Image (cartoon, helix red, strand yellow):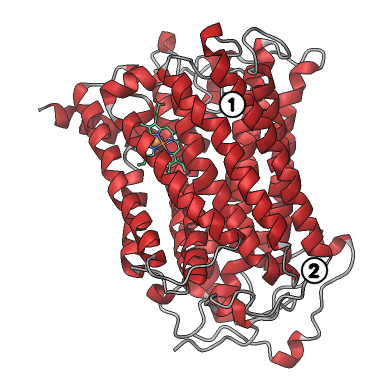
Amino acid sequence: MSTTTMTHDEAHHHEAPKGWRRWLFSTNHKDIGTLYLLFALTMLFLGGASAMLIRLELFQPGIQLLDPDLYNNLVTNHALIMIFGAVMPAAAGLANWMIPMMIGAPDMALPRMNNLSFWVLPAAATMLILSFVVPFFPGGGTQINTGWTLYPPLSVQVGMSMDFLIFAIHLLGISSVLASINIIVTLLNMRAPGMTLLKMPMFCWTWLVTAFLLILVVPVLAGGVTMLLFDRHFGTSFFDAAGGGDPVLFQHLFWFFGHPEVYILLLPSIGVLSHVIPAFSRKPLFGYNSMVGAMLAVATIGMVVWAHHQYTVGMSLGAVTYFMIGTILISIPVGLMIFNFIATMWRGSMTFETPMLFAVGIVLMFTFGGLSGVMLAVVPADMQYHDSMFVVAHFHYVLMPGAVFGLFAGVFYWLPKWTGHMYDEKLGKIFFWINVISFNITFFPQHFLGLAGMPRRIVDYNVMFTEFNVISSVGAMIFGLSHLLFLYIVIKTIRGGKKAESRAWEGAKGLEWELDSPPAFHTWTVAPQIK
Amino acid sequence: MKIPAYQTPELRRKNVRLAWVLAGLALFFLVTSFPFWTGLFRIVGTQAMQ
Ligand code: HEM
Ligand SMILES: [Cu+2]
């Protein structure tokens, strides 16, 4: 496949445009990747601020800072900002930066659509933030108190801020689907000659699967919230039992999206690990093919287990049994991925630079979250755990290591490539330790709280839960603030530092490391030959 | 803003065609999400009961 018409000579005439036009009109995958990453970082701090407010309120029993509606509004906003604003755009930023460089393509397949995918996001974020603040204006209606799951009938009763939120979700969905289409087309049509699908770097594989998942499930969420909109304003009763509808139907639509969504958040980070662990173990990834197979299995089974989030709504015994078995089955391919990572490290000559520290931390802590997941998958047990802080502990243990730490690992791993400077390794390690220890202080006690019966999404709690909540809140303050150090390291690296070589890590493999650090504005204008 | 120069018209057509196919898939899921997946869920539920 020949992918280039531009000769080397021509390429040099295409320098980066100057000023704001460079960013607003950008069709360059590296610039758009940077935009995504900056957007995600901003959202990380917004979402983090809301989380710290939540934990401040929960520091003591009783109601100190936030009235109950504001508390629930914050809980809703926190989840949506983190999932749609921070993690997904950050993963898309990595994809934009790395995929073309990894497969030897000059850019994404549809560069102008790429521009649109990004620039929809700030509009969506504005809508999301408006959905939070509108109730504070005269006539703004009630606050969103449903949590990110938006279950009716509550979500039908909320004021106009819910309409802002539905619009925001539509915009976010459009952005994700367009970006996914672009990524799939790029991966299928733009690979350098000789790079067969099974020679593709693992990060590309994880994104191929993620993008397909997004295309399949985001439209279902869009359908669900559109029906919600109709129930709210146009007299339909999709989710209204009084009109012949069924509120549980919404839960099915939401979780048909929601469960695959957790793999959408997880897989790109698994892709990052598949590069970081081999690089710092100085061994090739163990079991490449089985990794691809496991991922396809996770994605396939992951599409048909959604109702494990709704065990308590009174499904038939048959349905509940099916969803339980399906859910537990997923831990087999997930376990295989973890096994492959451990086997890659086995007898490798390992060193522990910051990306690798995060990688090892992820393997340990993500596995722990997977274990509490299996507990939750067991129906009679979940009858007790459901809607308790145990669930909160579970999903933070899978999401923080499984998604966020993986993104951190990726940022530290590729920052030298992007900026041309090595980050400050000592600060990176300090950040890792503060971050990981305070993460565990924050979320580990929540397991006990949940098991002891503390419900989630409630502003107040019984005095008997005080001690663990105090610990959790103290941890959360350290955890939240530790990200300022991350910001500092990133800014410092952008502004200067030790010069990075093209192969910034001696164990790193792949086409991206054959380009300069930082790479030219246009790279691989002549496709490399893959043997 | 310029149309990117690095794609041959042939590759460009191929890309756009695949993009439309994928968009079609997304649209298909949008319009069928409601009856199809809930129907499948019911079938699974009742079958498993037997
Ligand atoms: C072996 C793997 C896993 C199993 C068996 C599992 C099982 C479960 C179950 C049964 C629930 C519902 C608990 C309840 O509400 O009562 C749940 C909740 C959740 N899980 Fe997992 N899980 C697994 C892995 C993951 C992964 C990898 C992620 C994300 C990366 C994740 C994210 C979540 C989230 C976000 C929720 C809570 C959603 C909400 O109610 O707001 N889980 N999990
Ligand atoms: Cu799930």
Task: Determine whether, in the image, residue A455 is placed left or right of residue A417.
Answer: left
Query: Looking at this view, is A160 or A28 the one in front?
Result: A28
On the image, the x and y values in percent for residue A97 come to: 64, 66
Residue in the image at 56% along x and 28% along y: A148
Direction from residue A451 to residue A44 in the image, left or right? right
Q: Indicate the position of residue B25 as horizontal and vertical percent values.
A: 43, 52
Chain at numbered mark 1 = A
SS assignment at label 2: loop
Q: Residue flagged by tag 2: what amino acid is it?
A: Gly
Q: Are marks 1 and 2 in contact (CB under 8 Å)?
A: no
Is disc 1's CB within 8 Å of ligand 1?
Answer: no
Q: For residue A199, what is the image quadrant?
A: bottom left
In the image, A238 versus A514, the foreground residue is A514
Q: Residues within 10 Å of mark 1 (few under 14, many from 20)?
A: many
Q: In the rendering, which numbered label is found on residue A472?
A: 1
Q: In this view, which residue lies farthest toward the right? A: A19
SS at circle 1 = helix
For mark 2, name the chain. A
Q: Mark 2 sits on what residue?
A: A497
**Taking A448 as reference, is B37 above or below it?**
below
Which of the four quarters of the rendered structure image does ligand 1 lie in? top left
